[in-house]
Amino acid sequence: MEMAPGRIATWTAWAVIVFLQLPVLVVVLAAFSTTSYLTIPPQGWTLAWFAKVLSDPAWLGAIRMSLFLAFGATAIALALGTAAAYAIARRMVPGADALTALVMAPLVMPSVVIGVALLQFYALTGLRGSIFGLLMAHVVITVPYIVRAALTSLAGLDGALEEAARVLGATGPEAFRLVTLPLIRPGLVAGALFAFITSLDNVPVTIFLISARQTTLPVLIFSSVEMGVDPSVAAISTLLIIATGGILLLAERRFGFHRFI
């Protein structure tokens, strides 16, 4: 019996999804192994590696640093990106298309190139190794996600709604806050989520700019893998997978953010 093209495409898609998720499954299973080295299938089951990670000052410090950068960069990028997207969408600045390409450049440029360029610039300006410089670097790589999501939301928004609010007596900022902002909020949430995850997961840019006294979670994982992999790396990776998946699932159910990406 010949299979319909649509069914073939569906099964192919599922096969690709399963193949891509197999490494994730391997990492999760390895986190529960009782051995001091990674092994699949696990030789017994234990939560000791999770307890070790959550009680280790090095891991906890890296988690705090990563969360600080992710939340800080997302908040700043959200403010800057929303303003930039609004100005571009409403053609309030000359050369809107060129400005869009400039803002989106970090999405197409290799992260290593961005890291090296910022390292040289920070060396000249004295920002190398500073928290502020690292935070601004994360803003650079997260702003495009906010702008892209905001532009998508603004493209489907009737500008007459904001004009009507102004006719009824609202000022420009009031019309934006009371009319436009609530309507594009799902898109901004989508962009903020991707910006947060991008900042939290970044290694290529961070590793060039971080000082010897600081580290982030992805950089510490990268360093730990270089020195030898043990189940504690799998444990922290599993926690990241669970946290990221849970946040995305909640956001999808609340806002349906896939429509804005």
Image (cartoon, rainbow, N blue to C red):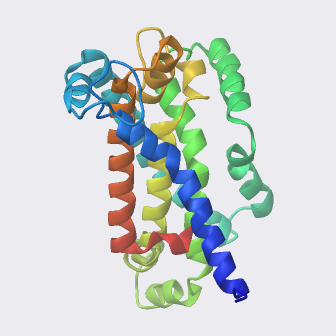
Q: How many marks?
A: 0
Q: In percent of the image, x 50 and y 88: which residue is there? A: 161
Q: Nearer the viewer, residue 193 or 39?
A: 39
Query: Where residue 14 appears, x then y in whole percent?
Result: 57, 68
- Residue 72 seen: no
Q: In percent of the image, x 38 and y 55: which residue is there? A: 245
152, above or below 64, in the image: below
Query: Where residue 87 appears, x then y in whole percent?
Result: 62, 64
Q: Identify the image quadrant of the N terminus.
A: bottom right
Q: Quadrant of residue 110?
A: top right
221, above or below 202, in the image: above
Q: In percent of the image, x 60 and y 63: which residue is there? A: 15
Q: In percent of the image, x 42 and y 19: which residue is there? A: 215
Side of 238 where 127 appears, left or right: right
Q: Nearer the viewer, residue 82 or 107?
A: 107
Side of 34 where 71 appears, left or right: right
38, above or below 251, in the image: above
Q: Nearer the viewer, residue 201 or 173?
A: 201
Q: Quadrant of residue 207?
A: top right
Side of 97 where 223 appears, left or right: left
Query: Where residue 104 appears, x then y in whole percent?
Result: 70, 52
Q: Identify the image quadrant of the C terminus.
A: bottom right
168, above or below 81, in the image: below
Query: Where residue 97 appears, x then y in whole percent?
Result: 78, 62
- Residue 8 seen: yes
Outermost residue toward the top? 212
